[in-house]
Image (cartoon, rainbow, N blue to C red):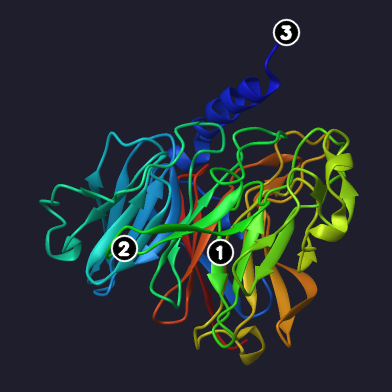
Amino acid sequence: MINLNYFSYILILILSQSLPVIAQNSILPLDKIKLPPGFSISLWAAVPDVHALTLGHKGTVFAGSKTSGKVYAITTDNGARQVKTIAQGLKMPTGVAFRNGALYVSTISRILRFNNIEENLDQPPQPIFINHDFPTERFQGWKFIAFGPDDLLYVSVGAPCNICQPDPSQFALISRINPDDDSYEVYAQGIRHSLGFDWHPETKALWFTDIGRDWMGDDLPADELNVAPEQGMHFGFPYCHANDVLDPKFGAKRDCSQSTSPAIELDAHVVPQGMRFYTGNMFPAEYRNQILVAQHGSWNRRTQRGFQLELIRIQDNKAIQREIFAEGWLQDGKAWGKPVDVLVMPDGALLVSDDFAGVIYRISYTQP
C-alpha cells in the first residue's frame, strides 16, 4: 500500500526545489502584482529558498531556508544588498528569531543559538544548542519561531501526518522555551501546522496561522487564523477543523464544542504561513495594527488558490474582514512566486519572502 503522507512529502520537496526560470534569470514580472493605490513592490534581495525572516538590532535581516539547509544574513551598504551564508548543512532551518544580540534558528529537532551574530557575520560563531529535543519526523517538521512579549521563545511543532492522532504533548502544538534556563512547556494544542504567529501590539494576545488538512475536497476544510490569548487552549486537530467541520476519521472522538473556533476562516488550501501585525508608520493609518498573511498557495487543489497576501481587519481584538492586499503571483493557473513570510521594517516598508522565486520583495507606500 502506498503511504500517501510520505508520497505527499516527497512531492512537496521536489516542487519546492524547482525554481522557475524567471527567478534564475532575475526577470520577475513584478508588474503583474496588484496592490492598493499608492503601494508599489520591488525586488529587495535574491535569496535562494528563503523562508522565515527576522530583524537584528543593527538592521541585519536574517532568513531561514527549508531544502538548502542554509541560514542567511542580508545587510545593506549604500543601498546595495549583501547576502551572506552564516550557516549551512542544517536540517530545514526555516525559523529565525533574534534576542539580545543572538540569532536563534530552528531545525527539525533542535534550536540553535548564534551569539553576537551581527558582530561576526563574516566569521559566525559555533552554535549553542538549546537543551530541548523536538521530534525528528520530517513531515511538517519545519518550524516557525519568535519571541513573545514575555521574552520566551515560541516554537511551532506540526503534526507528522496529513491526519492522525499524534502524541498531543509532542506534536500539533505551539510550545515555548525560556532561553535562559531551557525550560519548556506547551502553550496551545490541536494546531495542525502553524508557520507564522505574532502578538497583538496592544492586547499582547498570540495570533497564528494554521494550515488545514488535505484530501477532504477542494473546498474543505478552511485554513485558519486563530487567536490564543491564554495558555491551554485546544484548536481542534485532528477531531474538528475550521468552524465545526468534523473530521471523517477522528471526528466522533471529540465534539467541536470542546475546541476553540478560528478567529476567522481563510479559503481552503491557500496554505497560510507567515503573518505580522503591521506596526509601521509608512502605510496609511487604516493598516495600523492590522494583520498581513502570506499565502503560499495550494498544491493539491484542481483550481489553484492562494499565492497572495491577505489583509485581515481587526477590531476590538476580533477579526472582522478579509481583503486581498497583494496578488498576481498566480497567472493563468501557474505560479511564478509563492509568498512565505512578511516582516515590517523600521522605515515601515514590508518585506515579503518567496521561496519559489528565491527572492525577498519590498512593498512600500507613497501618497497617490
Q: Is residue 68 above or below residue 295?
A: above
Q: Amino acid at mark 1?
A: Phe
Q: Are marks 1 and 3 in contact (CB under 8 Å)?
A: no
* Helix, strand or loop under label 2: loop
Mark 3 vs mark 2: give the one in front.
2
Q: Which residue is mark 1?
A: 197
Mark 1 → mark 2, Cα distance in angstroms: 18 Å
**Residue at the image point whose x is 41% and y is 82% from the top:** 347
Residue 50 position within the rendered picture, expressed as x and y whole percent measured from the top left: 43, 48
**In the depicted view, which residue is nearer to us: 199 or 190?**
190
Q: Which residue is mark 2?
A: 179
Question: Horizontal placement of 322 versus 361: left or right?
Answer: right
Residue 11 position within the rendered picture, expressed as x and y whole percent measured from the top left: 61, 24
Q: Is residue 31 above or below residue 139?
A: below
Q: Amino acid at mark 2?
A: Pro
Q: Which residue is mark 3?
A: 1
Q: In the displayed image of the protein, which residue is found farthest to the bottom?
A: 285
Do we see residue 93 in this rendering? Answer: yes
Q: Residues within 10 Å of mark 2 (few under 14, many from 20)?
A: some
Residue 117 position within the rendered picture, expressed as x and y whole percent measured from the top left: 19, 60
| The C terminus lies in quadrant | bottom right
Question: Horizontal placement of 92 versus 103: left or right?
Answer: right
* Helix, strand or loop under label 3: loop
